Amino acid sequence: MVEALTIVLAMGVTRGWRAALAGAVAAVFALAAIVGALGPALTVIPIEALRLVVGALLLVFGLQWLRKAILRASGWRALRDEDSVFARETAAAKAAVSEEHAGLDWYGFTISFKGVLLEGLEVAFIVLTFGSTQGSIPLAAVGAAAAVVLVVVAGIVVRGPLSRVPENTLAFAVGVMLTTFGIFWGAEGAGVDWPGGDASLPVVLAFVVLMSLGYVTALRRRRPATA
Amino acid sequence: MRRFAHFWWDFVVGDDWRVAAGIVLAFGLTALLATTSAPAWWLLPLAVAAVLWLSLRRVAG
């Protein structure tokens, strides 16, 4: 979401707020339509099969986040630099030809729309998977909406590139949570009985956190002194 | 169509396809073990730890 807000801010500053905000709002409606269409379909799938598929997807998805966050935290991959993303987007927006459709700057609209839609798909995916396995997609959607509001407020307060948001820490936390729930639900879907039932979820969480922090430490030690 | 498929591949599988393949294999083994009388809960967490470490090592030498 931070990436999406950086793109919308860059479009707003350079191409005008009307097109940038219209693109962002249109993308939010498109995402709501995706959640609204897929949500009811997921609720008719048997819970065990749903947990297996959702668990596997969450796990694959969560490990992508966790892998990147660990590599960044250990210095093997550059931290995402929102300042440079903002500068790159604004430079490209200034250079783009102005073309109007329906009274809107088309470049600002489409870049905002695409940025929010692609980044928002991750959020829609999380809402659908967590909501469907827990039986309340609307509640998960409300939680996601609250997170969106928080990021937008942060953007308004900062009024520029979101370089002060600790993005890798957030990515690390999201990766840990997705991986934890992926292991827990996925294993249940595969027919596993966890010792202690739901009480083992915090133990799985602790395992994933310790494993991740251990990997960060191990990878830091592997870095050459000159790197 | 090719770009569409590439987008979904990148979205779901990401940078290292071997992680996704390892997870699918781990789920298969877990499901097999769960059909026996032996406890199966430990397999998936250990498989995740191994798959992630192997993927990290490919980047970090």
Image: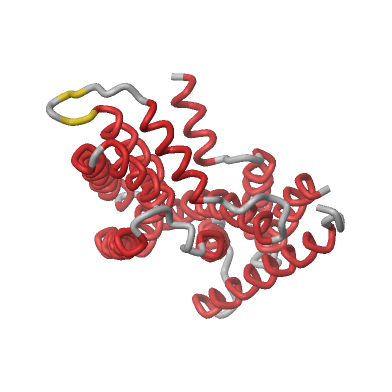
In the image, residue A155 above or below residue A211:
above
Dividing the picture into quadrants, the one containing residue A26 is top left
Q: Disc count in the image? A: 0
Expressed as whole percent of the image width and height from the top left, the position of residue A164 reads 47, 63
Q: Is residue A135 visible?
A: no
Dividing the picture into quadrants, the one containing residue A143 is bottom left
Q: Nearer the viewer, residue A36 or B42?
A: A36
In the image, is A100 to the left or to the right of A115?
A: left
Residue at image coords 28%, 36%: A15
In the image, residue A119 above or below residue A172:
above
In the image, is A90 to the left or to the right of B17?
A: left
Q: Nearer the viewer, residue B38 or A18?
A: A18
Expressed as whole percent of the image width and height from the top left, the position of residue B41 reads 64, 67
In the image, is B53 to the left or to the right of A92?
A: right
Q: Nearer the viewer, residue A40 or A90?
A: A90
Residue at image coords 55%, 55%: A62
Residue at image coords 48%, 26%: B5
In the image, is A160 to the left or to the right of A103?
A: right
Q: Is residue A64 visible?
A: yes
Expressed as whole percent of the image width and height from the top left, the position of residue A187 reads 57, 60
Expressed as whole percent of the image width and height from the top left, the position of residue A90 reads 40, 38
Residue at image coords 54%, 51%: A81
